[in-house]
Amino acid sequence: MRILIFDSLSRKKQEFIPIDANKVRIYACGPTVYDYAHIGNARMAVVTDLLVRVLKKKYKKVLFVSNITDIDDKIINESEKLKIPFKELTDKFSKIYNKEMSSLNVNTPDIQPKATEHIDEMILMIEKLIKNKCAYVMNNHVMFNVKSYKHYGTLSRRTLEEQLEGSRIEIADYKKNAGDFILWKPSKDQQPGWNSPWGRGRPGWHIECSAMSKKCLDTPFDIHCGGVDLTFPHHENEIAQSCSAIEPNSEPEHFSKYWFHNGFVTLNGEKMSKSVGNIQLVNDLLNKYSGETIRLSLLSAHYRQPLNWTKDILEQSKKTLLRIHKNYEKIKVNDFEAFDIKKNEFYIEFLESLFDDLNTPRALSIIGKNLNHVTTKNQEDKQKIAHATFEALNLLGLYSNNKRNIHFDDSLIEKLINERNVARKLKNFARADEIRQNLKKKNIEIEDTKEGTVWTKLK
Ligand SMILES: [Zn+2]
């Protein structure tokens, strides 16, 4: 079965053919860790996680690298504001990010490189770019000269004028051209910095990904992923740096063969972003909904479409999951191994829909259709339905812990929490404690706050 993906570089849905079928290599731009992740960040993580899971159905080895940006101006500003060392801030939020993503059943990347641990590689790449005459030093900055790379703008299809849209007309005194971007900049004494041939300073954001993807995957690799908002300038700049470091004007495909971009998350039709101030944090949502409900909401629209985030989507996903699980549990599951999943027609159709550029809306409707047959009297058919449903939910990451017969949904958790609160009111602390312990066994941690009892799903 062929895997098709939409490649943003060629703007075509194409058959995915790996460079080396024995080792598929993928890179995704990870988070800048100075605050809680919002649902837009989570969409990238969930969609990429699904892409990796789907590729693993066909290829034995898939190496997935996604970085942590732990040095950046936003990090420095936030640490100065909070008066804590930047490292303390980034350590805290990388841990939180990983924990939240794990609540959404996102598998940890095989390698999660940190920018601050790859400064040497960045310096080496910048030196190479200067040597290749694609970068220059000006007023203590090292700049990439966009005019040196003839393919600049290929990914985003922007003309030179469009590239400059929104940037200041006045050219900074360390730039030759308005579109040139920073590879290395000086750090003030109190700011984090590293020694380099150009003085004490820190890397620009774009060079981080070029250096880390080269180190962890080598180039060219198969797929570069990220949110569509990173296409310009970040991904365009990554291509310019990585390719020019190979040799001047090297083709964009020499960096990554395919480019995979997921759409925006919008709130009331507007792009969700920190600057607009309309963000919804994963952390807050996890207090109200299970990770699986949030994950299903993120997968309910096709990954390339904008996703309009509403309470309705969450409520609908909660209901859908409940219906799927209820129907699924009507079937007594005993011996899965007796069936060959590869011959199950529903599962084949389901897999085909995901192999077709991750068509999750279709995949979900196939699960629903499969479960409609649950009323059949034929026991063997029932087993087949159960088997296919389990495999499908497992691949989508909507059935965690691989526990086939234990389902613990949000409404049951809330029912138990209510029961515990009643027990506490009646001063039946033994029962209250028993419920807490039972929840804990299911990896549900509860906490009593002023606003009431909140729960989190641990992994
Ligand atoms: Zn990146």
Image: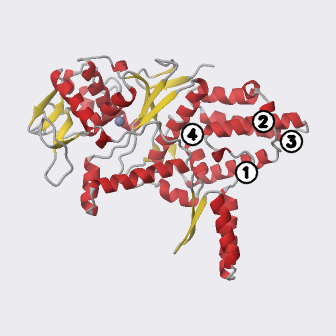
| Residue at the spot 54% in from the left edge and 57% down from the top edge | 286
Tell me the quadrant of ligand 1. top left
> Mark 3 sits on what residue?
375
> Mark 1 sits on what residue?
406
Colour basis: secondary structure
Q: Position of residue 158 (x, y in %)?
A: 31, 27
| Residue at the spot 68% in from the left edge and 60% down from the top edge | 411
Q: Are marks 3 and 2 in contact (CB under 8 Å)?
A: no
Question: Which label's residue is closer to the chain start, 3 or 2?
Answer: 2
Establish if 191 lies above or below 81: above
User: As rendered, which of 176 and 438 lies closer to the eye?
Assistant: 438
Secondary structure beneath label 2 = helix
Q: Is 366 placed left or right of 93 in the picture?
A: right
Secondary structure beneath label 3 = helix
Secondary structure beneath label 1 = loop
Label 1, label 3: how far apart the Cα atoms are: 21 Å
The answer to whether residue 37 shows anywhere in this view is: no
Label 4, label 1: how far apart the Cα atoms are: 28 Å
Residue type indicated by callout 1: Ile
Crowding near the residue tagged with mark 1, few <14, some 14–19, many ≥20 C-alpha atoms within 10 Å: few
| Residue at the spot 39% in from the left edge and 44% down from the top edge | 31
Q: Position of residue 212 (x, y in %)?
A: 34, 33
Q: Quadrant of residue 36?
A: bottom left
Establish if 140 lies above or below 187: above
> Mark 4 sits on what residue?
301
Question: Which label's residue is closer to the chain start, 1 or 2?
Answer: 2
> Mark 2 sits on what residue?
336
Question: Which label's residue is closer to the chain start, 1 or 3?
Answer: 3
Q: Quadrant of the N terminus?
A: top right
User: As rendered, which of 115 and 256 lies closer to the eye?
Assistant: 115
The answer to whether residue 146 shows anywhere in this view is: yes
Label 2, label 4: how far apart the Cα atoms are: 30 Å
